[in-house]
Image (cartoon, rainbow, N blue to C red):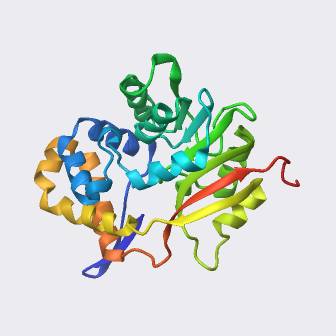
Amino acid sequence: MAFIYQNGPVTQTRTVGTAPDDYDAMHHAAQRSLLLHELWARAMGDDYPPGVQPTSSCSWWLLGHAVSALRLRPGARLVDLGCGRGGPGLWLARALSVRLTGIDFSAAAVEIAARRAGDFVAPDRAEFRPGSFERTGLPDRYADGLLSVDALPFSPDRQAALREAARILAPGGRFVLTAREQPADADSWPTMATAAGFDVERILDNTGHDGFWRRLFASFPENAAALRAELGERAADNLMLEAELSLAKGFPERPAQLLVLRRRDTAPAA
């Protein structure tokens, strides 16, 4: 996210850091900060899932719909794409009695998620690996279900990411992901998903999404000094800037959504 502003005669651009090192710093900071999770819980209210400790829009609403949509049998394999610190995937693995593989490009995320796994499931029920949306490193038809919470839309090539998701998902398996409805002049998520080999089963508007983020971002300046002390300068700077830019720019009128995609039994035409 970038913000262009005028500083006297000079136009400057301020950008939220999105390099792997920026994510590493944020994941380490989130793992040790009590205040950050307290602010998340206040902003989300009764919909906050405490054990998950999300740093996303993952809520009881989202987890409930994911359980219903994935339809996984005990012992099946769930893959969490852009797993971060692992909370949503690990919660679902425990709730559904399935095995979990988490993929993230942040080395810190992979390390922390692996450490957290024991709080949710037996040691042999979860693993975490480095990888990207476009190159997971997983075999064909590896997964029985896929999850991606506030992550896949950040892929630099969304269509390639969806094709990779279709490749690693067994026919008939379901992919639950969060995304914002695309602008009218861009390919829609249903269009991209269909081209990648999915059928769209369901699209649900997350009506509480934008209100939650507004409340959360508004709480950061009020707690800036304490957040900097807990998070460190790099993570705090990125967090504060993201909040500032998001509140200044405002949220699109297009809804935030939860999509349920089903892998077709036949591969898409080349």
Question: Residue 116, image x and y in percent?
Answer: 37, 28
Which residue, as the protein is rendered here, is positioned at the far right?
A: 269
Judge from the rendering whether residue 222 lies leftward or rightward of residue 17; answer left or right.
Answer: left
User: Residue at 31% of width from left, 51% of height from top?
Assistant: 48
Q: Compared with residue 126, is residue 160 higher up or lower down, i.e. above or below? A: below
Which residue is nearer to you in this view: 156 or 114? 114
Which residue is nearer to you in this view: 155 or 262? 262
User: Residue at 22% of width from left, 66% of height from top?
Assistant: 218
Q: Is residue 214 visible?
A: yes
User: Residue at 25% of width from left, 59% of height from top?
Assistant: 43
Question: Residue 90, image x and y in percent?
Answer: 45, 34
Judge from the rendering whether residue 246 lies leftward or rightward of residue 88; answer left or right.
Answer: left
Which residue is nearer to you in this view: 238 or 148? 148
Q: Is residue 59 visible?
A: no
- Residue 213's image quarter? bottom left
Judge from the rendering whether residue 140 lies leftward or rightward of residue 149; answer left or right.
Answer: right
Q: Compared with residue 4, is residue 265 higher up or lower down, i.e. above or below? A: above
Question: Residue 234, image x and y in percent?
Answer: 27, 47
Judge from the rendering whether residue 71 lies leftward or rightward of residue 22; answer left or right.
Answer: right
Question: Residue 126, image x and y in percent?
Answer: 51, 25
The N terminus: image quadrant: bottom left
Which residue, as the protein is rendered here, is positioned at the far top?
A: 123
